Image (cartoon, rainbow, N blue to C red):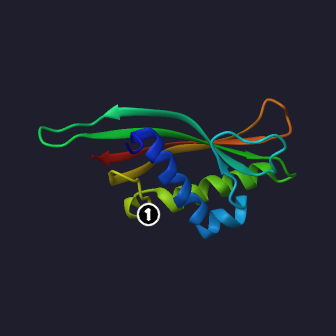
């Protein structure tokens, strides 16, 4: 049995993000589900994942709502976090052909919004992106 909507989408998004040369230059492949102890900054982490059924009369599908989190901690953390968010948007927004999701057809990828704020620790800047991946089975 293959992955379901959520796990297949995670794998496809991760592959697309680590393959993007602009983002790779910023995070050096650090796109993770769960950061290991002592991970280097900056990095991108998967946040909330929510599949929403999107069936028609003849096809099954889903919209996977994905939260991505960006963590940066240099002196220019806000700028760095914003650049990473911009790179993610440029790599994914309205580029369904750039994301391969095994077992499903990617119909669209929409970056809905993103924002950067200072983290609660006062040293880290955190970017949060909300996107949707539209899939047909």
Q: Which residue is mark 1?
A: 98
- Quick one: 77 or 50, which is closer to the camera? 50
How packed mark 1 is, by other alpha carbons closer than 10 Å (few <14, some 14-19, many 20 or more), is: many
Q: Residue furthest top?
A: 120
Q: Viewed as shown, does residue 57 lie left or right of 48?
A: left
Q: Residue at x 41, y 61 (%)?
A: 95
- Quick one: 39 or 87, which is closer to the camera? 39
In the rendered image, residue 100, in percent from the top left (x then y), is placed at 42, 58
In the rendered image, residue 36, in percent from the top left (x then y), is placed at 76, 42
Q: Residue at x 66, y 64 (%)?
A: 24
- Quick one: 124 or 63, which is closer to the camera? 63
- Disc 1 is placed on an element classified as helix
Q: Residue at x 22, y 37 (%)?
A: 55
Q: Viewed as shown, does residue 112 lie left or right of 105?
A: right
Q: Residue furthest bottom?
A: 21
Q: Quadrant of the N terminus?
A: top left
Q: Residue furthest left?
A: 57
């Amino acid at each position: 049995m293959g992955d379901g909507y959520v796990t297949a989408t995670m794998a496809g998004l991760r592959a697309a993000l680590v393959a993007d040369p602009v983002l790779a230059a910023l995070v050096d492949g650090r796109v993770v589900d769960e950061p290991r102890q002592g991970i280097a900054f900056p990095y991108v982490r998967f946040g909330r994942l929510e599949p929403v059924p999107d069936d028609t009369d003849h096809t099954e599908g889903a919209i996977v709502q994905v939260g991505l989190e960006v963590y940066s901690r240099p002196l220019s953390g806000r700028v760095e976090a914003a650049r990473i968010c911009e790179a993610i948007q440029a790599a994914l927004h309205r580029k369904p052909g750039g994301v391969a999701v095994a077992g499903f057809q990617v119909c669209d990828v929409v970056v809905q919004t993103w924002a950067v704020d200072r983290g609660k620790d006062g040293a880290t800047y955190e970017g949060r992106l909300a996107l949707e991946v539209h899939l047909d089975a």
